[in-house]
Amino acid sequence: MLLNKRTSEIIVAIAAFLFVLGTLTGLRVWDLEPSTSVQSAIVYGGALFITVIVVLRAFQGADLVGNWILTFGPCFGFTLNLFIPIMANPTAFIFPLVTGAIVSGVITVVGYLIGRGFSEV
């Protein structure tokens, strides 16, 4: 029953993961990497966009876990793309997983608190 409730959130998170990882990997493979300032602006804009989605969902009454599932996909895609090329050991998958969970947790908590704060007004 719980899985049926989370299916759409899981599917969206997987799609966001694949989009972020595929786009960033494609930019790297085709040597189209923008400058560092442009990359930073893209990351900040993406984080702001994800936070706005969480705020809106929290305002509508979505729970914290569902919002975290949604934010984990793109955050994990970004951290995996960031760390895998510079880490060559077999445990290279664990660091991006933990970092993605932390980043998505922070974005989720901030967005959720803002969204629930607006819904109480």
Image (spheres, helix red, strand yellow):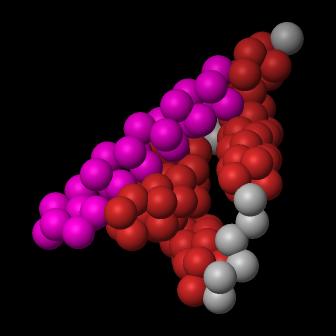
**Residue 41 location (% of width, % of height):** 78, 47
Q: Is residue 54 magenta?
A: no
Q: Is residue 81 left or right of residue 28?
A: left
**Span colored in magenta:** 87-113
Q: Is residue 24 left or right of residue 7?
A: right
Q: Is residue 120 above or below residue 93?
A: above
**Residue 15 location (% of width, % of height):** 59, 75
Q: Is residue 83 left or right of residue 26?
A: left
Specify the principal SS of the magenta part.
helix
Q: Quadrant of the N terminus?
A: bottom left
Judged from this view, the residue extending furthest toward the left is 90
Q: Is residue 118 above or below residue 10?
A: above
Task: Pick the residue in front: 102 or 6.
Answer: 102
Q: Is residue 79 above or below residue 89?
A: above
Q: Is residue 1 above or below residue 116?
A: below
Q: Is residue 112 magenta?
A: yes
Q: Residue at x 16, y 66 (%)?
A: 89
Q: Residue at x 72, y 22 (%)?
A: 114
What number of labels is visible? 0
Judged from this view, the residue extending furthest toward the right is 121
Asked whether residue 66 appears in the rendered view, the answer is no
Judged from this view, the residue extending furthest toward the top is 121
